[in-house]
Image (spheres, rainbow, N blue to C red):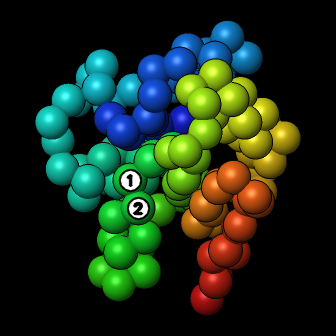
Amino acid sequence: MKIIADESVDFGIIKKLRENNFEVISISESNSGISDIEVLGISSKHKCLLNTEDKDFGELTYRLKLEHFGILVIRLNETIRDERINQSVQTIIQYFEELNMNFSVLNTTRLRIKRKITQ
C-alpha cells in the first residue's frame, strides 16, 4: 500500500504509517519545495493516494480537473498533535480502499468521501 505524503503532512503521520507497513513517499524527503501540481503529478505517476493538509488540492482537482488517484485532506488543525496523528493514521488504515480514487476530507467530526465520477 503506497501513499504520497505532501510536505504539509506532519512527519509523525508518515512515521506511523511506515510502522503500519505503508510505503510512504514523503515529498519533504524527496522533492522538497516542488509545486502542488508537481506533487499531484507524482501521485498520479505512482497511481496512489495523496495525503495532504493543503486544501488547495481541491481546486486543482475540481476547478482545473487534474487527474488524481485519491486525495485525503486532513483538517485537524485544532486537534492535539498525538490525537491528529492517531486519527489520521487510523482513518487511512480503516478506509484505505475507499480513499483511493476519491477526494476525501477528514475533520474533527467526520470523514467526508466525495466519490469520483467515472465516465
Residue placed at 69% from the left, 75% from the top?
A: 115
Task: Give coordinates of residue 78: x percent, y percent.
Answer: 55, 44
Residue 100's tag is none
How far is disc 2 from disc 1 in space, using C-alphas? 4 Å
User: From the image, which quarter does the C terminus lie in?
Assistant: bottom right
- Residue 90, by quadrant, is top right
State yes or no: discs 2 and 1 in contact (Cβ < 8 Å): yes
Position of residue 10 relative to residue 79, above or below, is above
Task: Give coordinates of residue 76: x percent, y percent.
Answer: 57, 46
Q: Secondary structure at mark 2?
A: loop
User: How many C-alpha atoms fall within 10 Å of the one at disc 2: few (<14), some, or many (≥20)?
Assistant: few
Which amino acid, mark 2? Answer: Lys
Position of residue 75 relative to residue 16, above or below, is below
The residue pinned by badge 1 equals 54
Whether residue 2 can be seen here:
no
**Outermost residue, top side:** 19
Which amino acid, mark 1? Answer: Asp
Residue placed at 60% from the left, 39% from the top?
A: 79
Q: Secondary structure at mark 1?
A: loop
User: From the image, which quarter does the N terminus lie in?
Assistant: top right
Q: Is residue 67 left or right of residue 118?
A: left
In the image shown, does 95 or 55 lie closer to the viewer?
55
The residue pinned by badge 2 equals 55
